[in-house]
Amino acid sequence: MPQDLGEPYLRDTDKIWEWLYIQYWLFNKRFIYNSGVWGNKNYKSCEDVILRACRYYCGVHRLTPIPGIQGDFGWLDCHSESILDSIRLFNRFHNMDNSRLNKKVFLWDRALCKENWCSSFKGILEDMNLGNYWINNRILPIELAKIKVYERLERDWKHHCSTKDKLRTYRIFKHDMTVASHLNCNMPKYQRSLISQLRLGVLPLRIETGRFTGLDVADRLCQVCTGNHVENEIHFLFECSEYNEYRHDLETAVNATFSELSIREKFDTVFNHPHSLSRFVTLAYKKRQEKMYRAL
Ligand SMILES: [Zn+2]
């Protein structure tokens, strides 16, 4: 059980990641156990608990866009787990003897198919283009179901990402729900937090802090250099002349020349080297804070 892992175990980031995953898995399995009987249902309170743990691990505040956190962890949410449980239940009914009470109730529910479990389940299958399994009353292979549930989750996730202003940069480099490399490597929490904030658009650069004072985006200029550029994540990472020295070290470490890469390739390169990136972000952000502080 998680509490048996002990404090010393938690000092290593790799172990914390494992511990967090075990917590997520136990939590999901414990609360979603047998959830198939409830059909197409959202589990907001369960999602909130998992989200809170993820937010703490990333070191981001509560206004951080949820789709960004979900995308960086890449875990199935409670709703998706419950859909899978519903499919397992549907398959069990298929193999069940018609004389059993459960099967009789299922057949009765299916015959009605209006505002009940069967109508809800049918809607889920149709949403995943699996309606023929319902019509033909066939067993739905669970491996296929997992693929379809994941596709459904990813489709909704992309839609939610597109609606969040803070994820303006995130949308450039994140196109699937896979675990972000900086989350499961050994790294001090402060550095993990900086990278997470940068990815999720909540690092307090001018593009973000300018919103608080109602500044137009075009006026949220970098106050560290003299280039009159909007200080967004791209400027901070790849353009601001004040961090050239650190950027040169970063290019050497990742064996790339940023000027030769597209913006997408630049992000892919730096996020695939979380340790090198964390050094750059820590030094650059420290310099930025010193300059901004002196400016005040
Ligand atoms: Zn600048």
Image (spheres, grey):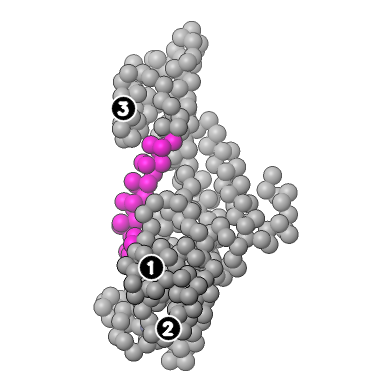
Residue type for callout 2 = Asn
Residue type for callout 3 = Gly
Question: Dot 3, how many residues are within 10 Å of its Cα: few (below 14), some (14-19), or many (20+)?
Answer: some
SS class, disc 3: helix
SS class, disc 2: helix
Residue at label 2? 244
Counting residues from the start of the chain, the first of labels 1 and 2 encountered is 2
* Magenta extent: 146-172
State yes or no: Cβ of the residue under disc 1 lies below 8 Å from any atom of ligand 1: no
* Quadrant of the drawing holding the N terminus: top right
Q: CA distance from mark 2 to mark 3?
A: 56 Å
Counting residues from the start of the chain, the first of labels 3 and 1 encountered is 3
Question: Dot 1, how many residues are within 10 Å of its Cα: few (below 14), some (14-19), or many (20+)?
Answer: many
Residue at label 1? 266
SS class, disc 1: helix
At a point 35% along the width and 33% down the height, the residue shown is 124
Left or right: 88 with respect to 13? Answer: left
Residue at label 3? 131
Residue type for callout 1 = Lys
Question: What secondary structure predominates along the stretch shown in magenta?
Answer: helix
Left or right: 6 with respect to 125? Answer: right
Does the rendering let one see residue 66?
no
Counting residues from the start of the chain, the first of labels 2 and 3 encountered is 3
Left or right: 293 with respect to 8? Answer: left
251 lies above or below 94: below
293 lies above or below 203: below
Q: To which quarter of the image does residue 204 belong?
A: bottom left
> Residue 287 location, x and y as percent?
49, 84
> Residue 271 location, x and y as percent?
45, 64
Left or right: 220 with respect to 252? Answer: left
